Image: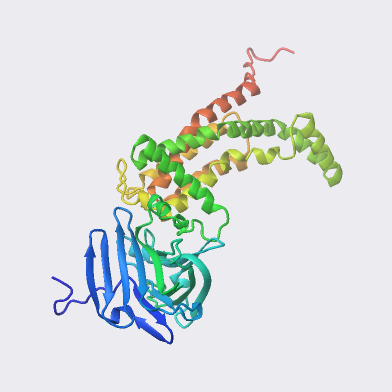
Amino acid sequence: MSASEPGVRAAPPLLRYRLVLDADTVALDSIPFRVVRADDGIAFTSTTTPQITVRYRFVPGAFLTHVRGEVAAAPADSLRAGALLVDLPTGLRSQEADAVEDTRHLAYGYKLTQSGVKSVAFDKLDPTLVRTDSGPMTWVSTRNKYFLVALLAPPSPESAPFSALRMQGGTRVGKLAPVGYATAVQPLRGGRFALDLYAGPQSWEQLRAAGHELENVNPYGGWIPGVQPFATICMRVLLWIKQTLNVSYGWVLVIFGIAVRLLLWPLNQSAMRSSLKMQRLQPELQEVQKRYKSDPDKQREAIIKLYQQHGMSPLSPIMGCLPMLLPMPVLFALFFVFQNTIEFRGVPFLWLPDLSLKDPFYIMPIFMGISMFVLSWIGMRAAPPNPQTKMMSYMMPAVMTLVLLNFASGLNLYYAVQNIAALPQQWLLTRERMKAAGPAPAPPAPLRGRRAAT
């Protein structure tokens, strides 16, 4: 059934073009065109005056289309040259099982020529106000969680950067904002305009090939500084492992988890040994704190002197916490990678149907929590009794299991693998601690006879 048959509503166009010429605004979907087809594209030429020609040339396998336009007899005066107005998509149809989550990711974005990428979520736009962000802009876009429509200004004499992006909110559905309105403005140059249209998945490789830093269209971490470059590094490493070893993304995460632990081995080793020294130093520290309880200055001087006597620094207590904190930046970056990267979407592994979604049987997050507890349990062996440490060893695995329970199963897979990869190092250091502590004192011999000898 075609959209032209009675009772069938035609789908709205992806983009709408308008030309501002002198005092007139011409909507290109309101005038007649004749069509000329070519092997690599198609050309539309208006039958009205002034004659307007728009050419599309398709790039095979790249989700990219070169769009070029020309207005015949356009004024050469830059003040009267006019502009192209492009109405961006008011939304993108969701193809995900969780359409609500997909809707929450709807946003407009743009890249300033002399600055970074800006993103404006649909739910941040006011339906009663028009927001205008000024350029020059290298590209403008509409995106949801995994897909994207972007217009790029190519570096050519007939192309100008986008000068502005006008945005406005649409009708709300409860707390969701499924609709937005945005218009990009591109000045004409000599009666010509040029742009490249990307309409496809947010595949890191495809976006990077399109140029103009389009791979940063979905800013990882939002307003949190430092996440974007770190997440980009993680993504590039994962793609490199995938291309080099030609294995599935499940095995890529396994290899990546082991590699992270191996790279952190020296730092982890130093941090764990610092923790061992701190445990041996605890009785003396407590004695110093008790002795100079009423004199904080002398207490501080005595503690620093004690550290120096044992070849340590005041930063040693912080170093002892590093084994737990070192993997966290990678885990945090991967959280945003799984939230926004299409490469893991729909990828199965073992019993997991989709690495980008939660484990339907909750096996992986529970296994991750167990591996975390085993790691802590080995680390507590032969350690001085500490109620707080013991409580944390039980609480942290439980808390992390609950936190990651409904997160991407691939994220749980990575965290579980790097916990298991850390077990040999934890075991070796625990043995080192047990040797340093020496053999446990033998229990007193039982008394024989009716009374003990004196």
Image side of residue 353 versus residue 278, left or right: left
- In the rendering, at what x and y percent does residue 245 appear? 37, 35
Image side of residue 133 versus residue 362, left or right: right
Vertical position of residue 72 compared to residue 282: above or below: below
Judge whether residue 358 can be spotted in this image.
no
Quadrant position of residue 285: top right
Vertical position of residue 330 compared to residue 195: above or below: above
Q: How is the image coloured?
A: rainbow
Nearest the camera: 454 or 136?
A: 136
The image quadrant where one finds the N terminus is bottom left
- In the rendering, at what x and y percent does residue 188 appear? 44, 74
Which residue is pictured at 83% across the width and 42% down the height? 299
Judge whether residue 338 can be spotted in this image.
yes
Quadrant position of residue 364: top left
The image quadrant where one finds the C terminus is top right
Nearest the camera: 38 or 362?
A: 38
Which residue is pictured at 40% across the width and 71% down the height? 192
Marker count (numbered): 0
Which residue is pictured at 57% across the width and 33% down the height? 380
Vertical position of residue 410 compared to residue 449: above or below: below
Nearest the camera: 264 or 449?
A: 264
Nearest the camera: 112 or 322?
A: 112
- In the rendering, at what x and y percent does residue 54 appear? 32, 71
